[in-house]
Image (tube, grey):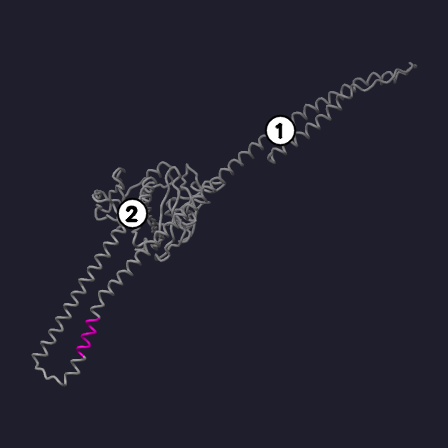
């Protein structure tokens, strides 16, 4: 089907050609008009002879004028066709750009669906884990009831014996030493029963611990592979807060800063490190691990694909107010996929003081830099608009990798470090950190 701009162009060209054809017909018909039949020559006056002499010259002038108008019309036609061709090429280019953006939107929606599927699988795994723990707890409770039944029966028997003793007290006259001996025997029997109960409870707890260890066995490192740390859960191996990680025996090791059992993946402050960088720099990482830095997309993908992680973001404004944003799960894709934000779990509103959720809008979005535009904005580059990098949808509600602003920070525009739900889009923050931590299977990330 012919596109509308091309159809209009063809209609205009056909109309102009029809006009030219009409002019050419008028010009060519003039010389070929039939000559009047010769009349008998009459005696002509001097005035008639002079008028007949001027007729050929006026006819030649009219033909020359028509020829000039024809050339001018052809020139205008050529200019008009050139303009229409340029407009058609521009429209075709705009349609190609829009088609590309539509393809990006389709890919982004596919990424979001994959993220939702991953969250559903994560929820199902947690539910299975909770059900397993509930079954273990019920079994443990039943065992404790069975073990305590003899003790309850013994206590009831002792109550009956005591009641019988009180009833027979009036009939029995015991000496003080005999009463003391009876009480001592009763205490000794009770102590033995308590000791037996403690041993039984200890055995039940040991069995329960072994069951939990067997349940976690599939997710623990193989025996003998503990030469290198795999996360900041092994932070006791860190030196001055810096830990060397090696995720698998075959992978390359790298250093990360630890904050207790959290791995710091990005830090912004007053060091003045420029975050308006290229794709290659974000891929490899940059900065100083002891100051402002970004860990690098390759390392972040390796960490989040090795095991399930949760995300925490710490924000601070220039007045010293600190707020937190936490997400139950977090992972990014590979470079081949443009490092999409493939997994972003539930926002943890119980983390206080809360900064609000300003990241879920970007879930599923690909990573963009100033030289590699992968966002969902049809007619802009979000990385260039916000002067930074990140996971942009149709641009963003947060810009943690924007430009650091330390003057007029309250009206920095949308090029600074902002978090919409904490101080708004125009306020550039003083400090920000992003941290991740592996999720223990038995607590589902709730620590």
Main secondary structure of the magenta stretch: helix
380 left or right of 264 in image: right
> What residue lies at 75% left-to-right and 22% top-to-bottom?
27
Report the disc number at residue 319. none
Residue of label 2: 263
Would residue 160 be counted in the magenta stretch? yes
Q: Nearer the viewer, residue 208 or 7?
A: 208
Magenta span covers which residues?
A: 153-162
Image quadrant containing the C terminus = bottom left
- 1 and 2 marks in contact (CB < 8 Å): no
> Which quadrant of the view contains residue 171?
bottom left
Residue of label 1: 81
325 left or right of 79 in image: left
Q: Nearer the viewer, residue 58 or 376?
A: 376
> Which quadrant of the view contains residue 175?
bottom left
Where residue 360 appears, as percent x and y from the top left, is 41, 50
């Amino acid at each position: 089907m012919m596109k509308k701009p091309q159809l209009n162009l063809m209609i205009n060209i056909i109309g102009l050609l029809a006009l030219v054809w009409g002019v050419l017909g008028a010009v060519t018909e003039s010389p070929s008009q039939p000559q009047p039949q010769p009349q008998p020559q009459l005696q002509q006056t001097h005035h008639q002879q002079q008028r007949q002499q001027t007729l050929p010259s006026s006819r030649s002038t009219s033909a020359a004028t028509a020829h000039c108008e024809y050339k001018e019309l052809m020139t205008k036609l050529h200019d008009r066709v050139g303009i229409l061709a340029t407009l058609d090429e521009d429209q075709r280019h705009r349609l190609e750009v829009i088609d590309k953006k539509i393809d990006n939107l389709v890919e982004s929606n596919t990424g979001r669906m994959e993220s939702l599927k991953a969250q559903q699988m994560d929820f199902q795994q947690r539910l299975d884990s909770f059900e397993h723990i509930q079954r273990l707890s019920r079994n443990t409770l039943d065992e404790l009831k069975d073990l305590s039944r003899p003790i309850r029966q013994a206590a009831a028997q002792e109550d009956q014996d005591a009641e019988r003793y009180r009833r027979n007290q009036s009939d029995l006259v015991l000496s003080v030493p005999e009463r003391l001996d009876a009480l001592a025997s009763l205490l000794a029997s009770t102590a033995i029963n308590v000791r037996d109960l403690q041993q039984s409870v200890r055995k039940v707890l040991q069995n329960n611990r072994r069951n939990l260890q067997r349940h976690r066995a599939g997710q623990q490192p193989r025996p003998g592979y503990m030469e290198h740390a795999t996360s900041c859960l092994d932070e006791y191996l860190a030196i001055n807060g810096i830990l060397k990680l090696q995720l698998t025996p075959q992978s390359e090791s790298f250093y990360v800063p630890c904050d207790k059992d959290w791995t710091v993946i990005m830090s912004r402050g007053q060091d003045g490190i420029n975050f308006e960088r290229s794709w290659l720099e974000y891929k490899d990482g940059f900065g100083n691990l002891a100051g402002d830095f970004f860990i690098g997309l390759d390392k972040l993908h390796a960490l989040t694909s090795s095991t399930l992680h949760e995300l925490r973001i710490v924000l601070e404004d220039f007045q010293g107010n600190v707020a937190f944003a936490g997400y139950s799960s977090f992972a990014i894709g590979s470079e081949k996929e443009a490092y999409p934000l493939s997994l972003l779990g539930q926002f943890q509103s119980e983390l206080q003081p809360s900064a609000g959720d300003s990241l879920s809008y970007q879930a599923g979005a690909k990573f963009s830099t100033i030289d590699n535009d992968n966002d969902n904005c049809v007619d802009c580059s979000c990385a260039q608009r916000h002067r930074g990098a990140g996971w942009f949808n149709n641009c963003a509600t947060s810009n943690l990798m924007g430009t650091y602003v330390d003057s007029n920070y309250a009206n920095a525009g949308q090029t600074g470090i902002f978090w919409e739900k904490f101080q708004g889009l125009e306020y550039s923050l003083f400090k920000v950190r992003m941290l991740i931590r592996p999720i223990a299977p038995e607590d589902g990330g709730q620590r």
